């Protein structure tokens, strides 16, 4: 996983609530057995017309949002399934930051495992941020993970809360599994007790 | 002398018995007892293990099935028509063989949807932790087990370490007292709750369902209810284990045997929340108030009782909900003010991990009996597993459905998510017993209305939604 560094990038606006994982990555693309290449299918049913051409009406096809790394979206982003294909697609498409008032639990979790920073802002702030993008399409925001801040040219300063552990993993690009395996002895002794307490779970 | 409340909720108890370690500045590590798998969310996890050269820590903790991609027409199961889907299926078979994992493949008499087959074999018990790369893992909360969906990175994490870094959820008690009318079901309770608290209402919470109406539910009903906990945004749903739970598990393949049974039982009885345990939030509903529910929009929270009408954007206070209402009306091709019972359907789907157990088929069959599905409507009945299918056939339910003009299929996820050949065409409208009515969920442009099995059967017979309370009994 790449380290998350401070960056100034174009913010794309998607003013929709409850964007669900079925929209983020439609099920016909879930059959791959690899982890890469999902970006081309991100928001497929919204992004493309039936004949395969780009749907000019769709937000992300707006040329001003080309190369955006920040995705600003309505409430409850990522609701629906646990499929990690959703953050894989978002990451592969080129976003590394999402801004919304709330996220579905599993999706939020999955973001951190894929180098994506999901920023939570309050409803008024989101409104102001959306207004700034609408008035100035193509505007770039600065995201500073270390200081947990995001600033806009229009003068909006956001400070967001973040779990310290997750923040550190993003900053360092750390592998969660390796971290857990450092405690393998503790897991081993827990298991010994567990076998005594719940032997029926260990009958094979 | 202390007035600190040491009483614990069921969630807190399960958390405490599964807490392994917390390193300063890191999330607590929670131990995982049971790991369920299907073909869609696991291949990349196996690939990751292989690349990092990590072994699976406990292969007995894993139970796998094939369900999402498998066709429900017998002929197609021999030779999967979809090449990419076939590769995913084959990858699962290969991975399970390589790591010596129990897999209920398509030829197995135990095959079916993961959340249907796992309880059939008694694999999940009260007080345990269970994960699966699938959000409807919440289903197993019906047994008083902490069961939740995880992403593929976490699937890999659990395979390698048998643990997950987890942050603690808040607790919500959803109390449903009173008695449900004979026309309403666990599905209607689930939809009514989501209608009340919204699809984000449970974000950050583990929900415990309690009260007279929950205690009165069968184990299968509790599974239906917990299955949809995720649709209210909750991490998991829980129902306290009781005599019904123990009775259900007794004698099942993975249930404790002989002298282990009494030991397990003694432990299980300690699992329910203490009487004076405190919850962060409490929601209360009266069972008598819960009419048969029908969703009208593209989110499970967009739901009304069957005798009501499709709402208008102006009926909602928040701007976001007004916009969502309008876009749902557009997508669903509905006009505000239309009576739900005036909405015609093209398709009826009876199945999915929410409602494909034997009781669901009995309930639907009792309504379907002697009816005839109109020619312009397709109705398919898809058992959740081969065990359900066989039981239904023994009881003659398949005949009732086929006589009424339904198709009787092989088990699988089928049209719940439409990645196996079963799907709606653009614009088609479906009464479905599944759990998600998102845009395109059942096929691009398809329109889904979530209902209970009995409501689905009544809808199939009439060609439009029906208030089953008005049917002659
Ligand atoms: S039936 Fe539907 S919700 Fe259940 S596991 Fe299959 S696809 Fe998921």
Image (tube, rainbow, N blue to C red):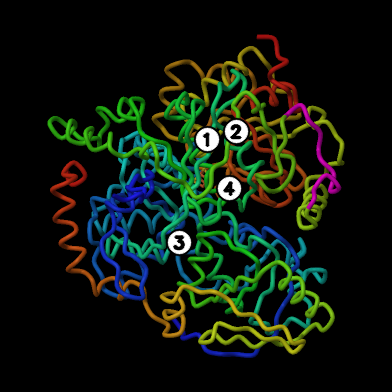
The residue carrying mark 3 is B151
Q: Secondary structure at mark 1?
A: strand
Q: CA distance from mark 4 to mark 3?
A: 18 Å
Name the residue carrying label 2. Answer: B285
The residue positioned 53% from the left and 84% from the top of the image is A145
CA distance for labels 3 and 2:
32 Å
Element at label 3: loop
| Quadrant of the drawing holding the N terminus of chain A | bottom left
Label 4 sits on residue: B232
Q: Main secondary structure of the magenta part?
A: loop
Q: Which residue is mark 1?
A: B175
Residue A84 inside the magenta-drawn segment: no
Disc 2 crowd, CA 10 A, few/some/many (<14, 14-19, 20+): some
Residue B72 visible? The answer is no
Q: Is residue A47 above or below residue A156?
A: above
Magenta-highlighted residues: B306-317
Q: Is residue A29 above or below residue A128?
A: above
Q: How many marks?
A: 4
Distance from the alpha carbon under mark 1 to that under mark 2: 6 Å
Q: Which chain contains the residue that carries disc 4?
A: B
- Asked whether the residues under marks 2 and 4 belong to the same chain, the reply is yes
Q: Of the residues under marks 4 and 1, which one precedes in the sequence?
A: 1
């Amino acid at each position: 996983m790449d380290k998350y560094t401070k960056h100034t990038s174009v913010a794309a606006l998607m003013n929709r609530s409850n964007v669900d994982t079925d929209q983020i990555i439609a099920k016909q693309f879930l059959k791959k057995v690899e982890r890469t290449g999902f970006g081309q299918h991100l928001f497929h049913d919204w992004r493309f017309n039936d004949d395969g051409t780009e749907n000019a009406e769709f937000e992300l096809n707006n040329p001003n949002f080309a190369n955006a790394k920040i995705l600003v979206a309505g409430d409850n982003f990522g609701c629906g399934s646990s499929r990690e294909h959703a953050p894989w697609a978002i990451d592969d498409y080129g976003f590394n930051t999402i801004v919304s008032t709330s996220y579905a639990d599993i999706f939020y979790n999955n973001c951190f495992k894929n180098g994506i920073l999901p920023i939570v802002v309050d409803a008024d702030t989101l409104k102001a941020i959306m207004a700034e993008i609408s008035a100035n399409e193509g505007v770039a925001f600065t995201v500073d993970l270390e200081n947990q801040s995001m600033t806009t040219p229009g003068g909006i300063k956001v400070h967001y809360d973040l779990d310290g552990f997750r923040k550190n993993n993003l900053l360092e690009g750390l592998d969660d599994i390796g971290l857990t395996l450092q405690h393998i002895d503790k897991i081993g002794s827990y298991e010994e007790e567990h076998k005594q307490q719940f032997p029926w779970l260990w009958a094979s | 002398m202390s007035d600190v409340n040491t009483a614990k909720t069921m969630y807190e108890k399960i958390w405490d018995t599964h807490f392994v370690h917390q390193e300063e500045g890191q999330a607590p590590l929670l131990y995982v007892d049971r790991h369920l798998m299907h073909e869609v969310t696991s291949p990349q996890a196996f690939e990751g293990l292989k690349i990092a050269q990590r072994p699976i820590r406990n292969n007995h903790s894993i139970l796998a099935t094939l369900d999402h991609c498998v066709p429900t027409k017998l002929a197609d199961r021999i030779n999967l028509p979809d090449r990419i889907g076939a590769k995913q299926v084959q990858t699962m078979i290969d991975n399970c063989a390589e790591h010596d994992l129990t897999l209920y493949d398509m030829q197995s008499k135990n095959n079916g949807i993961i959340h249907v087959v796992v309880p059939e074999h008694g694999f999940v018990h009260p007080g345990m932790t269970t994960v699966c790369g699938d959000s409807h893992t919440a289903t197993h909360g019906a047994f008083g087990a902490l069961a939740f969906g995880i992403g593929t990175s976490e699937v890999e994490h659990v395979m390698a370490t048998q643990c997950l870094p987890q942050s603690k959820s808040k607790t919500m008690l959803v109390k449903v007292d009173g008695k449900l009318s004979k026309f309403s079901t666990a599905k209607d309770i689930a939809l009514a709750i989501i209608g009340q608290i919204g699809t984000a209402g449970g974000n950050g919470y583990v929900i415990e369902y309690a009260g007279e109406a929950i205690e009165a539910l069968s184990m299968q009903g509790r599974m239906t209810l917990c299955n949809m906990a995720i649709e209210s945004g909750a991490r998991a749903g829980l129902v306290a284990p009781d005599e019904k739970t123990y009775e259900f598990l007794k004698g099942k393949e993975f249930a404790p045997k002989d002298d282990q049974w009494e030991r397990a039982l003694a432990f299980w009885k300690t699992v329910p929340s203490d009487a004076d345990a405190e919850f962060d939030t409490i929601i209360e509903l009266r069972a008598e108030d819960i009419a048969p529910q029908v969703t009208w929009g593209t989110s499970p929270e967009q739901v009304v009782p069957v005798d009501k009408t499709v709402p208008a954007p102006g009926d909602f206070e928040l701007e976001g909900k007004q916009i969502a209402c309008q876009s749902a009306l557009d997508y669903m091709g509905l006009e505000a003010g239309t009576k739900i019972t005036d909405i015609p359907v093209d398709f009826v789907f009876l199945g999915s991990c929410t409602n494909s157990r034997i009781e669901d088929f009995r309930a639907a069959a009792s309504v379907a009996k002697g009816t005839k599905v109109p020619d312009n409507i397709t109705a398919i009945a898809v058992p959740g597993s081969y065990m359900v299918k066989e039981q239904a056939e023994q009881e003659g339910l398949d005949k009732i459905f086929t006589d009424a003009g339904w198709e009787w299929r092989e088990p699988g996820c089928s049209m719940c998510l439409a990645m196996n050949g079963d799907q709606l065409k653009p614009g088609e409208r479906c009464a479905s017993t599944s759990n998600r009515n998102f845009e395109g969920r059942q096929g691009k442009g398809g329109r889904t209305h979530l209902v209970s099995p009995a409501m689905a059967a009544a809808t199939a017979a009439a060609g439009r939604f029906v208030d089953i309370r008005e049917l002659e009994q």
